[in-house]
Image: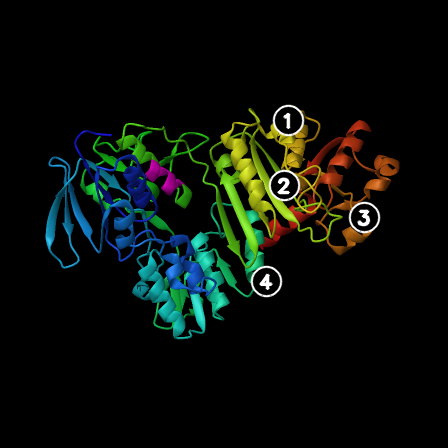
Amino acid sequence: MTDIAQTTIIIGGVAAGMSAATRLRRLDEQANIIVLEQGEHVSFANCGLPYHVGGVIEERDALLLQTPEGLHKRFNLDVRTGTRVTAIQRDEQTVRVVTPGGASETLAYDNLVIATGATPFVPPLPGIERALTLRNVSDMDKIVAKVAEQPRHAVVLGGGFIGLEMAENLAHRGIDTTVVELAQQILPPFDPEMAAYVQAHLEANGVKVITGSGASSLTNTHVLLTDGRALDADLVVAGVGVRPDSDLAVQAGLTVTDRGLIVVDDDLRTSDPHIFAAGDATAKRDHVDDSLRFVTLAQRANRDGRMIADAIMGNSVPSNPVLGTAILGVFGLMAVATGWTETRARAEGRQIRVIHTHPGDHAGYYPGAAQMHLKLVIDAQTDAILGAQGVGTKGVDTRIDVIATAIRGGLRASELIDIELAYAPAFGSAKDAVNMLGYIADNLAAGMTTSIQWHELEAAMAEGSVLVDVRDPEEFASGSIPGAINVPLNALRERHQELPDSVIVHCQVGQRGHTAARLLTQLGHQVVNLDGGYLTWKIATAAKE
């Protein structure tokens, strides 16, 4: 504890800012702590905002976790809402603010914390002013008021997390909803074949999804698209993305990246030793290559705030790189991700191995098992886990948490075999889905199996590779990959001489394909297994059509 009470000013009163303020108070009862928030509310549950729009969270007040009065009473914090910081004057160690009444004021600090977060990006389109955004409680109130007018048609611009959460909740209100995404797929943190499951589920629940086309302009009644279509739109929500709210840092001459992210060191200090920055406005170090990333996650923002308070008190704990672990829920379906995608790894020139599996969330013989879709991205040279993704109605959240923990612990992909996970038939399998990823990774690393990805198959077949479907004839008849020949697994030993020396094999999800590959390899064939089987190929190619 310092001998003379210091003043810490915190700009921003939500996750990172309030975590810094309350942690600092717990460490130093004498500190003078001022929190400046330009909005009407502090410490609100911004991740819950879409669900009040949809009526899932019925009570608005449930989202208001704290009030300035409550924070003053419990933590002796000077929390000022409706107070906008207009400038940081580093030489004088002061900030200029505009109070709720419009008066200007100058406040001095010993330590300054910038926790301004991120702001919605609104594309500069004709008529875009009628589009609503969702960042805070006031934004939510405007959308709720518009929903109360009972609009018939809504268009959500952007197919990221916020856009899809809004689409789900507008649909819950009985509004005919369309998502428009300029990219070729929704959910950029996912690879296309994994995002395809989410798109199919949205469409099955009545939400229309348009990809590969964006808005060109808005009228009072329609959203006009770049492909010439006009969508009915009584309500428009812009969920195109966010940008770091770092204008104050830029104006103050602090170091930022070319994307405007505030650069901080391991103690979350900026290029000015008296100024810290936390949360969505800051650049995070990537766990794979240490590059600077834009990661907007509440868990990390809260952690940043705590670390800054520790650093101010001289108890610094170095900041760890980020994985970007995230989860999205739409109509009962979960989509989860951590680390790098296959798309990013290939763009960075990494030599990788990729695994798709489709296991049940618990033992198949116990009632209620639900299929999961899991993907693991592995560094082919080191066996390091680069990232993972999952989609399913049950179980994928726990699996991604295990894998994220394994990455943080430095486990290699093959070492997933030995993670001991709780098992009973109602909760898992004797060989858990995570363990199975390890078994497959170990087979690939040892050269026991060679696999090919769904997006590589067409070129391989064009070059003359023969594709053998080892499923049962009934499965083959219900749907097959064009050009495949059907030789069921149980007949493969007797009929293998009908096949050429080099073949690609596949089954429904990959397991029987592996068995076929091992059998044919030992019978003298050169064999590649289609990773993830027919199911992965089907969802991926359907999304491309």
Q: Quadrant of the C terminus?
A: bottom right
Question: Mark 4 or mark 2: which comes first in sequence?
Answer: 4
Residue 405 located left or right of residue 99:
right
Q: Picture coordinates of residue 522 (x, y %)?
A: 80, 27
Q: Indicate the amino acid at tag 1.
A: Ala
Q: Picture coordinates of residue 457 (x, y %)?
A: 65, 41
Alpha carbon separation for disc pair 3 and 1: 29 Å
Residue topped by disc 3:
472
Q: Is disc 4 surrounded by few (<14), some (14 to 19) or many (20+) residues within 10 Å? A: few
Question: Mark 4 or mark 3: which comes first in sequence?
Answer: 4
Labelled disc at residue 204: 4
Indicate the secondary structure of the residue bearing disc 4: helix
Residue topped by disc 2:
356
Labelled disc at residue 445: 1
Residue 302 belongs to the span the image colors magenta: yes
Residue interval drawn in magenta: 300-306
Seen from the viewer's position, the closer of residues 62 and 168 is 62
